[in-house]
Structure formats: C-alpha cells, structure tokens
Amino acid sequence: MSEHPILEFDEVTVHYGASRALDKVSIVVRPGEMVSLLGGNASGKSTTMKTALGLLRPSSGAVRVNGVELTATAPPARIAAGLASVPEARRVFPAMTVEENLYVGGYIRKERRSALAARAAELYEHFPRLRERRGQQAGTLSGGEQQMLAFARALMSKPRLVCMDEPTMGLSPLFVDRVLDEIARLNRELGLAILIVEQQAELALSIAHRGYVLRGGEIVLRGTAAELLDDPRVRDAYLGKVTS
C-alpha cells in the first residue's frame, strides 16, 4: 500500500464571517515533495496555510495529516503529527541568541536540554552560518540569515512537512537566491516535504515539484512545476485574468 499524503485538503471551504476565503479547495502534499501555492493578494494562499496548521477551522471539507483527519484540531495536534511552520516575515526573537531561538523551536517535543543541544548541533551541520553566529542576537542577523534561522527553528521539532509563508519577502535579490537554494537543498538532503506560499511564481516553481494557483479562494490551475512554468495562464492568474 502506498504511503499516505502528509497533508491532504478534501474540498475545504473556509469563511471569515460571511466572507468565503476558500471554496472547495483540494490539495495534496506527499512525502518528500515540494509544493508551491501561487496567487496574488487575497487569493487564499495564506488562508490555506493557516488552515493546514490548524489556525483556522473549515466550515466544510476535511483536512488530513498522514491519512488521519484532523479538521477540527488545534495547532498542537498538527505539530505533533509532524507539521511545522516558517511564518511570514520570519518572526525570530531579536533579543535572543541564534541558539536560544533554535531551542524555542524544540520545546514542543518536551525533551531535555541535552537533547535540544544535540538537535541544534545536527542542524548546524546543515546551516554552518548559524553555527558561526550561535551566540549572536538574532536581531543583528541579515534578513537572509534570519530566514535561515526561522527555517532551522522549524526543523528543531523534527517535522515531516514544513509550511513556509512568503520566505523571500523583504529580502535582497542576492539573499532571495540563497534562501531558495537552501530550501531546495534541504528538501533533497533531508527528504523533507515543503508547502511554500509565494507570490513570485517563477521563483517558487524553479524549486518546486508541483504547484497550485489560487484566485479568489479557488484553485484555478494545478500541475507540475514545468507545466505551470510553460502555461501562459499562470501570469494571467496573478492579474485576475484566468481564461478557460
């Protein structure tokens, strides 16, 4: 029997009050896969991410993690099931050191400090720049380094799927390329599944396996990264001009 998807939305509808933010959205993220959610402002990308993490509850449809329905559960249940988050704008703790930020990411596992130290040491092998700055306050890091710290902090909980919300936001072009290269490298080396929300279609699809394009809370296009990159409607979707 094939392995269950790590994350599955089955016709999920989400409302903000009377406003419908997602309309019968169905997506799948499989083990080791990198999937991009694309779309313009108010397309439903961040709502999809928040629903995956249990921050929003669907009004209909089902959310499954590793084949188990967790539609009505709160974020701790999603984290325990193997999901982690790298939030928009990174949100590191600026007055804390790099290493202290990492430990915060591992506390959900309720392990001894020695175990957290061992996990941090493992991650320093993947993020040598963070090892060099382990005693430095996170607020003094560059934007790209803070993004890498936010990613490493999420990995402290040993997730199977990391949800990344706009990882390139606010970064210089040089750091955009570095961050995307690091995300792709860790996907390959660790077999880590990644769900990435990104407005810059070409950038996101350059490292993804598959993608979904959202407009007005609905999925209007889906396919492999290569298919979407070659589809002229991808650009139209960002302008609200998807054609049949």
Image: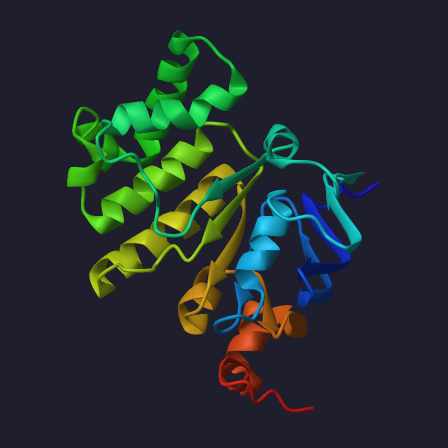
The residue that appears at 22% across and 35% down in the rendered structure is 138
Is 208 above or below relative to 221?
above
Residue 68 drawn at (x, y percent): 78, 37
Residue 180 drawn at (x, y percent): 36, 56
Is 70 above or below relative to 231?
above
Asked if residue 170 lies left or right of residue 74, the reply is left
Figure disc tally = 0
The residue that appears at 58% across and 65% down in the rendered structure is 44
Do we see residue 122 in this rendering?
no
Q: Judge by depth and name the residue closer to the eye, 62 or 236.
A: 62
Q: Judge by depth and name the residue closer to the eye, 29 or 99.
A: 99
The residue that appears at 69% across and 65% down in the rendered structure is 18
Classify the position of the C terminus by image quarter: bottom right
Q: Residue furthest front?
A: 17
Residue 48 falls in which quadrant of the image? bottom right
Do we see residue 242 in this rendering?
yes
Asked if residue 118 lies left or right of residue 58, the reply is left
Asked if residue 55 lies left or right of residue 5, the reply is left
Q: Residue furthest right?
A: 1
Residue 205 drawn at (x, y percent): 48, 67
Residue 107 drawn at (x, y percent): 46, 20
The residue that appears at 68% across and 47% down in the rendered structure is 7
Classify the position of the N terminus by image quarter: top right
Residue 115 falls in which quadrant of the image? top left
Q: Judge by depth and name the residue closer to the eye, 109 or 117.
A: 109
Colour convention: rainbow
Asked if residue 207 lies left or right of residue 33, the reply is left
